[in-house]
Image (cartoon, rainbow, N blue to C red):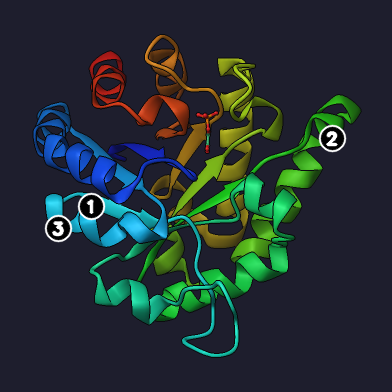
Amino acid sequence: MRRKLLFGNWKMNKTIAETKVFGKESVELEKFAKSKNVDIGIAPVYLSLAALKEANPSLIVASQNLHYEDHGAFTGEISIPMLKELGVDWAIIGHSERRSYYNETNESCNKKLLAMEANKMTPIYCVGETLEQFEKGVTKKVIEEQVLEGIKGLSKAYVEDMVIAYEPVWSIGTGKNASKEIAQDICSYIRELIKKEYGDASSKIRILYGGSVKPENVHDYLAQKDVDGALVGGASLKVDSFRQLIENI
Ligand code: PEP
């Protein structure tokens, strides 16, 4: 039985002080989530990782990115040992904003995922097609490339415990939701791809939907057979809204 997972991606929002306030309130939020058998986590900006961990040590805290090298001449980057020192052992990899604004590719994502496996970190690997690709009807081809190139070389045991998020680029931060049928179709397609490569790891891996998920629509997505949770941007920024997401599952 796969546990449901609601993950907040805060993008470039909240100062350290604002994060501390949320972090303290997240203690109750996490208890509430546990009572509903739901896992929750948050990916704040790098600067706030330590503050969030300190405010709520049991919360799953993820970095929004990382570099695959441990150290070196990579201005502006952060590495796995730096995150582990803070007790952060999750990271979002390949978010569409990083793919489109910072030239993240399937190949660079693969290097990051391999480095994460070597260091026992859990990834949320994001895949999704652009509006143009959706309109051309090549969604599954794009998803197949992103999934298979991204996870190349990972072990079966690692893939079982990782998380993949299907986030159609045209639905992120736009208020334009993919239908629940599209979410189910693509999440089930991702599970099939995993099955072909890794056999029964496909029944354990958690696959999330992301893109304008709100308290009003979260239930529709999570009621789908292959949707194990949601990656949520805007609606994860306020404690009340996060609580409603959990409540409405
Ligand atoms: C995201 O940032 O991954 C996301 C899905 O954002 P939003 O929920 O705001 O569309």
84 w.r.t. 15: above or below: below
- The residue that mark 1 highlights is 52
Circle 1: residue type: Leu
Q: Position of residue 146 (x, y in %)?
A: 70, 54
Cβ–Cβ below 8 Å for labels 3 and 1?
yes
Q: Earlier in the sequence, mark 2 or mark 3?
A: 3
Q: Where, quadrant-wise, is the N terminus in this rendering?
A: top left
x 33%, y 45%: residue: 42
159 w.r.t. 223: above or below: below
Q: Position of residue 27 (x, y in %)?
A: 10, 39
x 50%, y 61%: residue: 65
Q: Is mark 3 within 8 Å of ligand 1?
A: no
Q: What count of labels does the image hold?
A: 3
Element class at badge 1: helix
x 31%, y 20%: residue: 241
Cβ–Cβ below 8 Å for labels 2 and 3?
no
Circle 3: residue type: Glu
Q: Residues within 10 Å of mark 2 (few under 14, many from 20)?
A: some
x 64%, y 46%: residue: 97
Frontmost residue, 14 versus 10: 14
155 w.r.t. 17: above or below: below
Q: Position of residue 192 (x, y in %)?
A: 60, 44
- The residue that mark 3 highlights is 54
